[in-house]
Image (tube, helix red, strand yellow):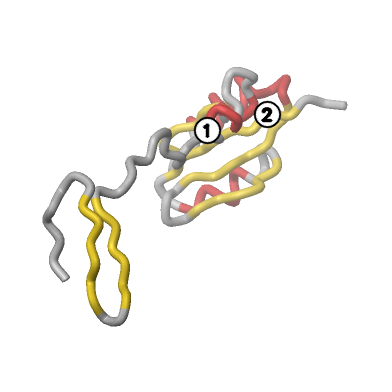
Amino acid sequence: MQSRKSLIVYFKSPKVLKKLKTFGNLTYYHKKRKYAVLYVDGDKVDHLIDEIKKLHHVRYAEVSRLDDDQFTLDDFSDLGKKEDEHPPLRTLMMKKQKCQVKKLDNPLLLC
C-alpha cells in the first residue's frame, strides 16, 4: 500500500481549486478561510509542494501535522476541562418566594 500525506494549501482565490485537483485527491476546502486539504503520494511530497507554491493564487503549502507521530489528538483531550472548580461563594435557595442566603465568604447578595 502506498503512503499518503496530507497537504494544507492556503490560497488567495478559489479559482486555484481546479488546478489542485490535478496534483492529488482534494478532500476538503473552505472558501471563507481560504485553505484546502489535499492528499498526495508520500514519495512525491517535496516535489509537489514546490510545484503547488508556484501556482498563481497559492499563498502557502505545507505538510499537515496530523500525520506526525508527535502530534496526536490525545494531547488535546483535556481541553476545556477545569482542574479545580472553586465552590461558589454563596448558595441561593428559593423557598416560598423568599431568598435565603447561606454566607460562605462574601456577604454580598442582592435578591
Could you tell me which residue is drawn at 15 percent across and 48 percent down? 106
**Farthest-out residue, right:** 1
Residue 84 position in % (x across, y down) = 39, 35
Quarter-wise, where is residue 59 in the image?
Answer: top left
Please state which of residues 22 and 88 is positioned toward the viewer in this rendering.
88
Residue 32 position in % (x across, y down) = 42, 56
Q: Is residue 105 left or right of residue 17?
A: left
Taking 91 as reference, is 24 above or below it? Answer: above
Mark found first going from the N terminus, 1 or 2: 2
Quadrant containing the N terminus is top right
**Farthest-out residue, bottom:** 96
Mark 1 element type: helix
Q: Is residue 13 left or right of residue 8?
A: left
Q: Which mark is residue 76?
A: 1
The amino acid sitting under disc 1 is Phe
Quarter-wise, where is residue 7 in the image?
Answer: top right
Mark 2 element type: strand
Taking 9 as reference, is 101 above or below it? Answer: below
Quarter-wise, where is residue 4 in the image?
Answer: top right
Local crowd size for mark 2, using a 10 Å CA cut-off: few (<14), some (14–19), many (≥20): some
Q: Nearer the viewer, mark 1 or mark 2?
A: 1
Q: Disc 1 to disc 2, how far (Cα)? A: 22 Å
Quadrant containing the C terminus is bottom left
Please state which of residues 96 and 91 is positioned toward the viewer in this rendering.
96
Taking 91 as reference, is 20 above or below it? Answer: above
Dots 1, 2 in contact, CB < 8 A: no
Could you tell me which residue is drawn at 62 percent across and 22 percent down? 68
Pointer 2: what residue? Answer: 5
